[in-house]
Image: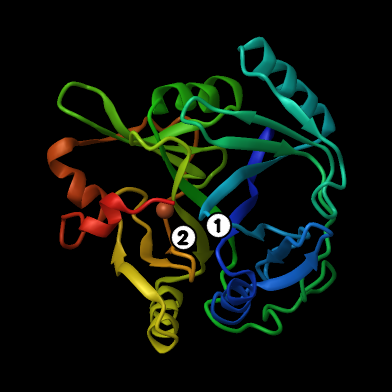
Amino acid sequence: MAITGVLRPGHTQLRVLDLEASVKFYTDIMGLEETGRDSSGRVYFKCLDEVDHHSLIIRQSEKTGMDFYGFRVLDRQTLEKLDSDLRAFGIPTTHIPAGDLLETGERIRFTVPSGHVIELYAEKTNIGNSRGYLNPEVVIEGRRGISPVRLDHWQVHGGDIDGSVKVFTKILGFSVTEQILLGDGTAAAVWLSCSNKAHDIAFVRDERDNTLHHTAFYLDSWHDVLNAADIMGKYRVKVDIGPTRHGITRGATIYAFDPSGNRFETFAGGYTFYPDIPPITWTEDEMGAAIFYHDRKLNEAFLTVVT
Ligand code: FE
């Protein structure tokens, strides 16, 4: 086994302003499957292709944004080791008991210097998908709407991104895949991978600590991104930008907003990363092309809206 330690973004808890309108959006337009509701009113979803019980949790709130970002780790032993490594590094952790989230084992929670609440967990019930594990079909049953393959990554904003990148690289084992450096050498943004993906999380320097720029859902192909754009048009989803392509990761993308104003991305492609590959650096004057390769400039909403 080559990929060990932190495996992937596994779940995330999003605050929404109107729970039932959001359930309808994430079910009918995004095309996720509702897998449960808990006693506190939270609603759980997974992508039809995913096998773990949930990847997105939404809860009613007066304020938009993300409560926490959860990463699945290999096993219980890994969870315990990372917990002790974080504490030794000076990052306090709290233990959330198994069962607090439906079908999920104990979670280790901590806050990184940019203000974001990160969780690690080793156990979540595999409820499977319509394919199964024995002589599976290619087709996933019941697809509707955008129907992404998986929760893919997040872009988050905060002040001390250097501190957060240090925790992710030194303790959690992530690699820097790409970065935008300002003229004075300061990192404006850093893309990090714990896997073979071009990124699993990105940190962008911003005085607004603990904010979310977007949650990304993965699609299989550029054609699926175009299909997502067609669905956004049909259902009058508020689009930020796209379809277009990133210079960073080389992925195809659309940014749009859910009914509460939380930005999401439908993302496809991106190169395969290996940890021996040195980071790609973009300079400040090429920041536009780094983000949106075709027209090589950033739009106002992309730069200013976070939740
Ligand atoms: Fe993204």
Q: Amino acid at mark 1?
A: Glu
Name the residue nearer the viewer: 90 or 197.
90
State the residue position of label 1: 62
- The image's mark for residue 72 is none
- Cβ of mark 2 under 8 Å from ligand 1: the answer is no
- Name the spot of residue 178 as percent of width and height, x first: 35, 37
- Whether residue 198 appears in this view of the structure is no
Q: Residues within 10 Å of mark 1 (few under 14, many from 20)?
A: few
The residue that appears at 80% across and 66% down in the rendered structure is: 36
In the rendered view, does 260 fall on the left or right side of 296? right
In the rendered view, does 224 fall on the left or right side of 28? left
Q: Vertically, is 9 above or below 226? A: above
Farthest residue to the left: give it: 285
State the residue position of label 2: 262
Q: Vertically, is 70 above or below 16? A: above
Name the residue nearer the viewer: 125 or 207.
207
- Please identify the quarter of the rendering in which residue 195 is found: top right
The residue that appears at 44% across and 77% down in the rendered structure is: 228
Disc 2, SS: loop
Q: Amino acid at mark 2?
A: Asn
- Name the spot of residue 294 as percent of width and height, x first: 19, 62
Q: Looking at the figure, which quarter contains the N terminus? A: top right
- Name the spot of residue 101 as percent of width and height, x first: 79, 50
Name the residue nearer the viewer: 206 or 171.
206
Tell me the colour scheme of the image: rainbow
Q: Are marks 1 and 2 in contact (CB under 8 Å)?
A: no
- Please identify the quarter of the rendering in which residue 112 is found: top right
**Among the two numbered marks 1 and 2 on one chain, the one whose residue lies closer to the N terminus:** 1
Disc 1 versus disc 2: distance between alpha carbons?
A: 13 Å
